[in-house]
Image: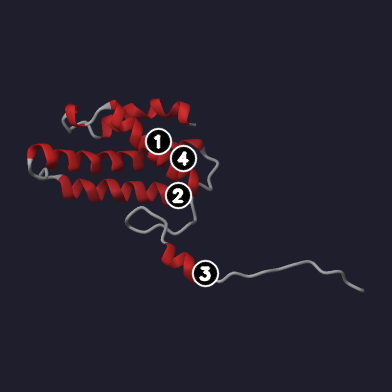
């Protein structure tokens, strides 16, 4: 799958088209796509490749936007005015796609909600011989 990530770069760039090009390079998008792919591969339970690609793209858009916000704050000295609303929108879109490909609990920070996983009860089962 990693070989095909380059095909998703234009999708990420298009979604972030209103941001200055010098703050978002293809190399940066590539790194964020690889991060998104690693997470999606870890939680994925789907076999539908289009949906998996959408989840990877949405998560990479979110990661790239977070990276851009940090970079803009460092270089410009302030956070872009539309940063917070876009941050939440990109996060919600990514979370929606991730929830479509997994039944694992995800929290609002786009990570596995281990507090829920810790509370789940384990059970064991087995098959025994019968005398009947």
Report how far apart the C-alphas of labels 1 and 3 lie in the structure: 31 Å
- For the point 27% across and 38% down, the residue is 64
Q: Using the rendered view, name the quadrant where residue 56 is placed.
A: top left
> Is tag 1's residue or tag 2's residue first in the polypeptide sequence?
1
Q: Using the rendered view, name the quadrant where residue 116 is placed.
A: bottom left
Give how far across and how far down residue 39 sits, in percent.
43, 45
Mark sitting on residue 34: 1
> Is tag 4's residue or tag 3's residue first in the polypeptide sequence?
4
> Is tag 1's residue or tag 4's residue first in the polypeptide sequence?
1
Q: Are marks 1 and 4 in contact (CB under 8 Å)?
A: no
- For the point 32% across and 47% down, the residue is 93
Report how far apart the C-alphas of labels 2 and 4 lie in the structure: 9 Å
Give how far across and how far down residue 51 sits, in percent.
46, 40
Disc 3: which residue: 120
Q: What colouring method underlies this structural image?
A: secondary structure
Tag 3 secondary structure: loop
Can you name the residue that lies furthest to the front here?
Answer: 74
């Amino acid at each position: 799958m990693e070989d095909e990530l380059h095909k998703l770069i234009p999708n990420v760039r298009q979604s972030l088209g209103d941001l200055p090009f010098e703050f978002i390079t293809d190399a940066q998008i590539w790194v964020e796509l690889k991060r998104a792919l690693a997470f999606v591969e870890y939680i994925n339970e789907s076999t539908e490749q289009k949906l998996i690609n959408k989840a990877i793209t949405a998560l990479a858009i979110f990661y790239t936007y977070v990276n851009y916000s940090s970079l803009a704050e460092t270089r410009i000295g302030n956070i872009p005015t539309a940063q917070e609303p876009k941050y939440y929108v990109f996060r919600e879109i990514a979370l929606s796609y991730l929830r479509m490909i997994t039944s694992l609990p995800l929290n609002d920070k786009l990570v596995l909600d281990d507090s829920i996983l810790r509370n789940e009860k384990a059970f064991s089962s087995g098959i025994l011989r019968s005398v009947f």
